[in-house]
Image (spheres, rainbow, N blue to C red):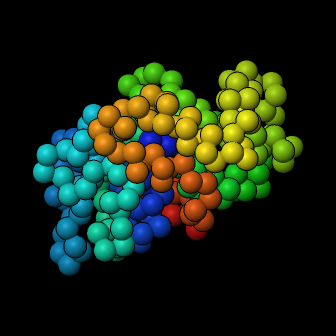
Amino acid sequence: MIDVLRASTTITHALAAGCHAIHPCRDVETARTLAQGNSAPDPPRLLAGERGGIRIDGFDLDNSPASFTPSHVGGRTIVFTTTNGTAALDTCRGADHIIVASFSNLGTVCHYLAQHALPVHLVCAGTNGHVTAEDCLCAGAIGLSLQKHGNHDTDSHDATRMVTDLFAPMSDAPDALLHALRGSHGGRNLSQLGFDTDIVLASRQDTLDLIPCYDSQNQTITMLA
C-alpha cells in the first residue's frame, strides 16, 4: 500500500521511532472505541489521524510523520485513522502479504520484493477515490526497481509502465521529485494547510531501513522481521 502524503510515510516513521504497533482503522468512531480497549499495565493507546488533513478533535497526534518521535510514540501502541491511507489498507485485506511503502523506505521495500518471486500489486491510496501523482510516482519507483532486477513482469501491464515512465526522469533528481510532489494533488492540499515540511520529509528517499507489515487478521501493523 502506498500513501506517500502521508499515511505510509507516517507509519514507517512511527515504527522507526519505536512504537510497539499500529492499529489502522477505517473510521473515526472505531478508532475511538479501539483506543479505549487496552488494559493495565499497558500504557494507554495513542489516537492518531486526520480528516481533511487536520488532526481529529481529541486525538493525540495528527498524520504528520515529524510528529511521531521516540519521545511521543516509543513503546506505545497507536490507533490510526486517515482519510485515504487506512481505507486503502482495508481494501488490501485479501492479499497474502501486505506491506507499506513510501519513499522513506523505498530501497528496503524494493529489495524485499525482488527477493520474493510473488505477484506484486501496487495499491495507491489516492485522494477520495481519485488517482494522485504522489502515489503513482512511488509506485513507478518500485516498478522501475523491479524492472532492473528482471524477476517481475512490468512490461505487460499498462498501468505499471505508465507509472514507471512517470518516475523515470526523477530517479536521480531529488529536487525534481520534490517539485513533483509539491505539485501533486496531495502536495497542493498539504501546502495550503501549511504542511510543506511534511512534503519535504516524504520526498527523501531511503532514510529508513524497515518495512511495515499489516496483519489483516489481527488488524495490526508491525515491523517486518
Position of residue 50 measured from the top left corner of the image (x, y, whole percent): 27, 43
The residue located at (36%, 73%) in the rendering is 70
* Residue 76 visible in this rendered orientation of the protein: no
* Residue 133 visible in this rendered orientation of the protein: yes
Front-lying residue, 184 or 72: 184
Front-lying residue, 76 or 39: 76
Position of residue 26 measured from the top left corner of the image (x, y, whole percent): 32, 38
Residue with the most extreme right position = 150
Residue with the most extreme left position = 58
Q: Quadrant of residue 154?
A: top right
In this image, 30 relative to 166: left or right? left
In this image, 108 relative to 188: left or right? right
Position of residue 67 measured from the top left corner of the image (x, y, whole percent): 33, 60
Front-lying residue, 95 or 160: 160
The residue located at (22%, 73%) in the rendering is 43
In this image, 188 relative to 119: left or right? left
The residue located at (35%, 52%) in the rendering is 64
122 w.r.t. 161: above or below: below
Q: Number of numbered discs present?
A: 0
53 w.r.t. 184: above or below: below
Give the quarter of the figure containing the C terminus.
bottom right
The residue located at (48%, 53%) in the rendering is 201
86 w.r.t. 105: above or below: above
105 w.r.t. 127: above or below: below
Position of residue 157 measured from the top left corner of the image (x, y, whole percent): 75, 24
